[in-house]
Image (spheres, helix red, strand yellow):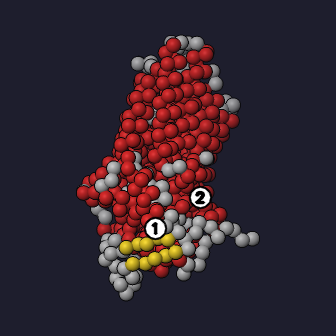
Amino acid sequence: MAFSRSAVQIFYIFLGALACFVYGIDYGYLSGVLSEPVFIQRYGTWNSATESYELKSDRLSLLSSTIYVGSFAGALISPILAKSWGKKRSLIFGCLSFAFGSALQLGAVNINMFIAGRAISGLLISFANVLGPAYVNEIAPIHLRGTGVVMCLQLLTLGNFTSSMVTLGAAQRTDRLAYQVPIALCIMVSGVCAVALLLMPQTPIHLAARGRWEDARRVIARIWHMAADEPEVEQEIICIRESLGNHQSDDSKWIELFQQQNLRRTIYSAANIILMNAFTGINFYLTYGSVFAAQAGFSSPWGVTALLAGVNCFTTTPALWMVERFGRRPLKFVGGAGSVIFSLMAALAYSASPDGPTSHRLLIAGVTLSVFFFAGFIGPAGWAYTAEIPTARLRAKTIGFANASYVVFVWAFGYASPYLFQDPVNLKGAFCYIWLGGNVLCSIFDYFCLYETVGLAHHEIDQMMASGVSARRSAQWGRDKKASRGDSTELRLEVEGLDEEKMPATVVVSTYTKDP
């Protein structure tokens, strides 16, 4: 049976993004088990006043935030490994590290061993966040690049939902399997992901940077499901030459992130991922969902966790299409407006009647709708932007620095949050006021600093950033650029500094199509 080009391309993108599914599995399981009685009895402390076990703020902070220690290390290590091993092998290493860390959690005999497992598992989070979108970005055709990066987010949310449902089912048990089954799922899925990645090739840019141009050509032809001598393949080879310029990817240095034009791209990438994930509240809701719901007075906090995970997952699906149809800036603006409105609704509802059942329902409704606008609009556009805005030579390092910066913020938020929404501050549902302010700040950043990159090739994004055009005018710049090359059916590349015996200085490639 013959498959269409788009079907084959999407299949390869799916395999390349699988590490994000593993990350989502971890995201979902911890949020649920933190409120399970058997887990609290195992790792909590005895409260003689209430004659019950409980997870106090200090232990809750350690359990939820220690993973970011590994994430910080992973954000800095992953670009270094990607430089020597390539993104494919580095992702496999991340999956195996995650499996080892999960095994420590599964067999933990005390809380220290469990926390050590969390820290080791954290390596995969940054490997998935840094190298997953970068890998997909480099293998996907232009018309599927945004969709491919959003697929990373879709698989993350699907993993989160899958794990939440498994945790919800296992919560009915009264023995240790209540939390060990979700951990075992982490080990199984990471193993499957590692095997799937073995079937994938290295990225064409990684091969080309080492002078293996024919291998790069064969990889493009394989993933794009076409002959190696077709115009589209030749076009991509030229784009890679333009992106690499006179440099090799291995020549890039960390200091370059903060020099000249790269500084702005580094700051924008880091600020986007920090504001998008740490300041909107999404990380808090998906990590502490069950505990937050219990503090707000809900009798079935696991159900709230499953609800938020489901909304987060299935709302992301339409964005696979919307991110290329409407662009990055419009999605961010719609999502920002919705998140601000419903964060305010949740905060006001709780403030009006902290102990009322109607107030509790309005609180969860506001939180759920905030998650809806993040998952359907803010997250997909933000992930695409973070993967696209760095230059090719510095992509892994830029995203790595952005994620390391993000991890510092999200660790601080994650560690401090239990002290704020429960003892000693006890904000409970009023904690939503903090996320209201964060969403306002995120929306301001998006208006002034988020560039529209939809439909632009990597070298065209380089040209846009070098031109000095403001983010507010970037959409018009992109429309003018696409119009000048014939609405993507004819692409003229002015390639400077190339060996004329290997490639002419000006090449016109026509008959570019998305699907036969």
The residue at the point 24 percent across, 57 percent down is 260
Count of numbered labels shown in the rendering? 2
Q: Residue at x 41, y 32 (%)?
A: 440
Q: Quadrant of residue 9?
A: bottom right
- Residue, disc 2: 14
Residue 374 picture location, percent across and down: 52, 38
- The vertical placement of 37 against 160, above or below, is above
Image quadrant in which you'd find residue 192: bottom right
Residue 308 in sight: yes
Q: Is residue 26 left or right of residue 75?
A: right
- Quick check: 344 left or right of 302? left
- Observer-side mark, 1 or 2, equals 1
First in sequence: mark 1 or mark 2? 2
Amino acid type for the residue under numbered disc 2: Phe
- Residue 326, above or below 357: below
| Secondary structure state at the residue bearing disc 1 | loop
Of residues 347 and 465, which is closer to you in this image?
A: 465
Residue 82: percent from left, percent from top: 41, 62
The C terminus appears in which quarter of the rendering? bottom right
Amino acid carrying mark 1 in the image: Arg
Residue 30: x percent and y percent?
54, 37
Element on which disc 2 rests: helix
